Image: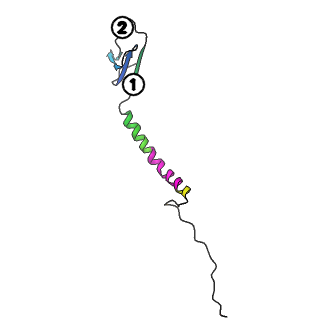
């Protein structure tokens, strides 16, 4: 692994600390009893990017959701015409 900022590593059961760098690679100080190393990486901007993607997805899905809700309630959507007019026969007046 190449040393990258924001990478956290823990040796054994110890707490996670920022990883060090040795000749461009990750370095983790070890004692003689450590048998396990774990590293975690969270890219910068991950939370902000995920939030922006969620808002964008909601913006794209909103018109579809709105149309479905209105169709369930029996209301026409704004871009749909209301029911077409019904042709009725014309009544003429007759003299008696």
- As rendered, which of 77 and 43 lies closer to the eye? 77
Q: Quadrant of residue 71?
A: bottom right
Image quarter of the N terminus: top left
Q: Quadrant of residue 19?
A: top left
Residue designated by label 2 = 31
**In the image, residue 49 above or below residue 69:** above
- As rendered, which of 7 and 94 lies closer to the eye? 94
User: What is the residue that sits farthest to the right in this orientation?
Assistant: 96
In the image, what residue occupies the spot 34% across and 25% down? 6
**In the image, residue 49 above or below residue 86:** above
**In the image, residue 92 above or below residue 47:** below
Mark 1: secondary structure:
strand
Task: State which tag comes first along the sequence, 1 or 2.
Answer: 2
Mark 2 surroundings: few (<14), some (14-19) or many (≥20) residues within 10 A: few
On screen, residue 93 versus residue 48, left or right, reads right
Image quarter of the C terminus: bottom right
Per the rendered image, the range of residues in magenta is: 57-69
Q: Position of residue 23 (x, y in %)?
A: 33, 14
Tell me the chief SS of the magenta region.
helix
Mark 2: secondary structure:
loop
**In the image, residue 31 above or below residue 21:** above
In the image, what residue occupies the spot 39% across and 37% down? 49
On screen, residue 13 versus residue 61, left or right, reads left
On screen, residue 94 versus residue 61, left or right, reads right
Q: Quadrant of residue 89?
A: bottom right
Q: What label sits on residue 41 in the rendered view?
A: 1
In the image, what residue occupies the spot 50% across and 50% down? 65
In the image, what residue occupies the spot 38% across and 29% down? 43
Q: How many marks?
A: 2
How far is disc 1 from disc 2 in space, using C-alphas?
A: 23 Å
User: What is the residue that sits farthest to the top in this orientation?
Assistant: 32
């Amino acid at each position: 692994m190449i040393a990258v900022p924001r990478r956290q590593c823990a040796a054994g059961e110890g707490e996670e600390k920022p990883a060090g760098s040795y000749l461009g690679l990750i370095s983790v100080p070890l004692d003689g009893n450590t048998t396990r190393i774990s590293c975690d990486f969270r890219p910068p901007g991950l939370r902000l990017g995920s939030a922006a993607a969620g808002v964008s997805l909601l913006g794209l899905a909103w018109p579809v959701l709105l149309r479905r809700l209105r169709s369930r309630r029996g209301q026409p959507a704004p871009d749909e015409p209301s029911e077409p007019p019904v042709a009725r026969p014309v009544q003429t007046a007759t003299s008696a």
